[in-house]
Image (tube, rainbow, N blue to C red):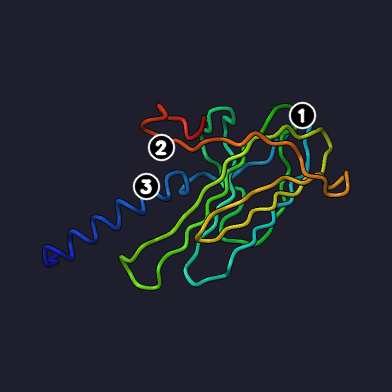
Amino acid sequence: MNYPKSRYLRLCLALGIAESLLGGCASAPYVEPKDGPTARLKVEVMTAGRWRESTFVQTFEHSENCRGVRNLLKNSPSGQVRIGAASPISLQFIHIEQAPFPLLATRSCRVIVTFEPKPSGNYAVEAIGAGEGCAMSIRDLDANRAEVSVRRREFVDIVSGGGNLCR
């Protein structure tokens, strides 16, 4: 490609920023458990509905250290899956709002929580994304949408986290 030097540098910078923001977004799809106790998880995503935004609701193959990202929902306002209920599960919500013009500031936010679903339980994940920030809560649908106790997790980049995405 024959880009002018400044345009090439901006392209490289944009690609680098996109890679760091989307770390884990290009992940394998989630596969529902085939055996053992399960619970139902309804996912509800609410955003400002702006042009060029992306949302991801994900879980991890290894929930305690957030390794092995699996997409539950990508760029969709709702969905439903079965999750394992034998141990805690970590969920991650990422919202990315791209500027309407290339190479302008992109805003993003990320929330990671861990909770322990009860066997045969019914839960709703409420994920809210806006350029200013993200919020995520888990509701117990069997208990009148009561908020479920969660452990908020801190995101760490994969290099400084030694391969882990949270602590």
Q: Is residue 156 left or right of residue 146?
A: left
- Give residue 24's position: percent from left, percent from top: 46, 44
Q: Residue at x 11, y 63 (%)?
A: 5
- Asked whether 66 or 47 is in front, the reply is 47
What kind of element bears circle 3? helix
The residue identified by callout 2 is 157
Q: Quadrant of residue 4?
A: bottom left
- For marks 3 and 2, the one nearer the N-term is 3
What kind of element bears circle 1? loop
The residue identified by callout 3 is 20
- Asked whether 68 or 46 is in front, the reply is 46
Q: Residue at x 62, y 57 (%)?
A: 128
**Is the residue under label 2 in contact with that under label 3 (CB below 8 Å)?**
yes
Amino acid type, label 1: Gly
Which quarter of the rendered picture does the N terminus lie within?
Answer: bottom left
Q: Residue at x 74, y 27 (%)?
A: 86
The residue identified by callout 1 is 36
Label 1 environment density (alpha carbons within 10 Å; few <14, some 14–19, many ≥20): few
Q: Is residue 36 left or right of residue 55?
A: right
Q: How many marks?
A: 3
